[in-house]
């Protein structure tokens, strides 16, 4: 395993995700809907760092079955973030069919990645690319990147509108406490998503697994920000 500075940062980001998940489960009321969604966001962020770490550290070269591992989950972040906003600003919010619909497109892309992975298992590494191409992998990847960008724009607007409308109707003390931080989190996630999309494009020059030099900037700052937030705020109880 090659532990460069980049790999160390990626590993640290994954570790931070695990720590925060543990802290929420043990010190917060994780059964509250907003904490369940936040746990989901942390899981997605942590898992999304795995492909870059496995590729950059050389682990994939030692175990080719990890190639095409369906761990690229960035497309889930903004739908989950929007649901998190709703859990804060919408009274008596519950996860229902309309909420699950926001995750349908990300799930479709993830299922596609699972299919690619299963069909390449056991194949010689030289043949894996050919198998992926037979499933139109690179065409679907381009569509994925475009959809990811559209989701960033759409859910940023929806979350902003949700917060704006809630403010017009007067926020509760708890909502007021959340609103400023959530605004910064939204801006931070948008900036990170732009870096992510940029790294996806630049990553074509570096390969599917090794990604681009910008990869480590996605995920780690998000987890650190959530950690700072959880250490300073009083959550709903």
Image (spheres, helix red, strand yellow):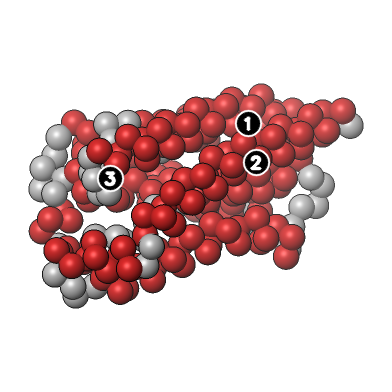
Question: Please, what secondary structure does the residue beneath circle 1 have?
Answer: helix
Evaluate whether residue 100 shows in this view.
yes
Q: Which residue is mark 1?
A: 182
For the residue pair 22 and 169, the one nearer the viewer reads as 169
- For the residues bearing labels 1 and 3, Cβ distance under 8 angstroms: no
Question: Please, what secondary structure does the residue beneath circle 2 have?
Answer: helix
Which numbered disc, 2 or 3, marks the residue that appears first in the sequence? 3
- In x, y percent, where is residue 204? 29, 41
Mark 2–mark 3 Cα distance, whole angstroms, equals 25 Å
Evaluate whether residue 95 shows in this view.
no
Q: Quadrant of residue 82?
A: top right
Tell me if residue 169 comes above or below residue 66 in the rendering.
above
Identify the mark at residue 52; answer none if there is no mark: 3
Farthest-out residue, right: 169
Which numbered disc, 2 or 1, marks the residue that appears first in the sequence? 2
Tell me if residue 71 comes above or below residue 181 in the rendering.
below
Identify the mark at residue 155; answer none if there is no mark: 2
Mark nearer the viewer, 2 or 1: 2
- Quadrant in the picture for the C terminus: top right
Q: Say left or right for 103 vs 195.
A: right
Mark 2–mark 1 Cα distance, whole angstroms, equals 14 Å
* Image point (74%, 28%), residue name: 176
């Amino acid at each position: 395993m090659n532990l460069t500075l980049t790999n160390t940062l990626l590993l640290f980001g994954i570790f931070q995700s695990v720590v925060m998940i543990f802290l929420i489960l043990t010190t917060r009321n994780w059964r509250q809907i907003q904490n369940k969604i936040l746990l989901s966001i942390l899981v997605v962020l942590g898992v999304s760092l795995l492909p870059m770490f496995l590729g950059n550290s050389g682990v994939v070269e030692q175990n080719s079955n990890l190639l095409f591992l369906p761990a690229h989950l960035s497309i889930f972040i903004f739908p989950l973030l929007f649901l998190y906003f709703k859990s804060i600003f919408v009274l008596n919010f519950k996860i229902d069919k309309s909420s699950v619909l926001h995750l349908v497109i990300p799930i479709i892309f993830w299922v596609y990645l699972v299919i690619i992975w299963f069909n390449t298992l056991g194949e010689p590494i030289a043949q894996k690319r050919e198998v992926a191409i037979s499933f139109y992998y690179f065409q679907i990847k381009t569509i994925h990147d475009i959809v990811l960008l559209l989701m960033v724009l759409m859910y940023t607007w929806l979350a902003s509108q949700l917060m704006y409308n809630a403010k017009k109707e007067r926020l509760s003390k708890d909502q007021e406490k959340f609103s400023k931080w959530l605004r910064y989190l939204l801006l931070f996630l948008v900036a990170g998503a732009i870096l992510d999309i940029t790294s996806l494009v630049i990553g074509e020059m570096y390969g599917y697994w090794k990604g681009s030099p910008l990869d480590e900037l996605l995920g780690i700052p998000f987890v650190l920000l959530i950690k700072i937030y959880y250490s300073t705020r009083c959550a709903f109880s």
